[in-house]
Amino acid sequence: MGSDNEQTELLRMIWQAIKDLGTGLGARIDETNLRLDQTNARLDQTNARLEAVRFDLDSKIEELHHALVESQMRTATAITDLAGDVQRLTTFLKEHQADAKRLASCEVRIDRLESRVAVVEGRPAH
């Protein structure tokens, strides 16, 4: 019968080892869950920071877009003004070229008239 007692004792020891193992595993699972909760908390903080950064970037992008549109509008206005100035200058130059041609034509006619008057008056023509 000693054999039955030994077997019973062996089974009790195995049972106790299984219970101890279960207790140890439970503690390890609790520790793992705690670490997982901490990791999730850090992840939530990181997500919150990322969201704040994204919001800040979106705001800055909106500001840059607004500044770019304003700059483009100022540039377009300046180009339009410059085109108007060039057109006015071109018109002015064309008018003055026409005036210069008329003046040259008048000077030629005056020289001819002076030559004819000089001939009529008996003076040498220049």
Image (cartoon, rainbow, N blue to C red):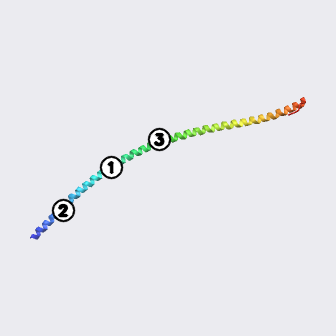
Whole-number angstrom distance, CA of label 1 to CA of label 3: 31 Å
SS state under label 1 = helix
SS state under label 3 = helix
Q: Earlier in the sequence, mark 1 or mark 2?
A: 2
Whole-number angstrom distance, CA of label 3 to CA of label 2: 68 Å
The residue that disc 2 covers is 17
Looking at the rendered structure, the number of numbered marks drawn on it comes to 3
The residue that disc 1 covers is 42
At label 2, the amino acid type is Ala
Q: Mark 3 and mark 2 in contact? Answer it, CB < 8 Å.
A: no
The residue that disc 3 covers is 63
Whole-number angstrom distance, CA of label 1 to CA of label 2: 37 Å
Horizontal side of residue 48 vs 79, given as left or right: left
- Locate residue 39, reporting x and y percent: 31, 51
Q: Determine whether 113 is above or below 36 in the image.
A: above
Is 124 or 14 nearer to us in this picture? Answer: 124
Which residue is at 44% across, 44% downward?
58
Say which quadrant the C terminus sits in: top right
- Classify mark 1: residues with Cα within 10 Å, few (<14), some (14-19) or many (20+): few
- Locate residue 86, reporting x and y percent: 65, 38
Say which quadrant the N terminus sits in: bottom left
Q: In which quarter of the image is residue 59?
A: top left
At label 3, the amino acid type is Glu
Horizontal side of residue 31 vs 79, given as left or right: left
Outermost residue, left direction? 1
Q: Which of marks 3 and 2 is nearer the N terminus?
A: 2
Q: Earlier in the sequence, mark 1 or mark 3?
A: 1
Horizontal side of residue 56 vs 13, given as left or right: right
At label 1, the amino acid type is Arg
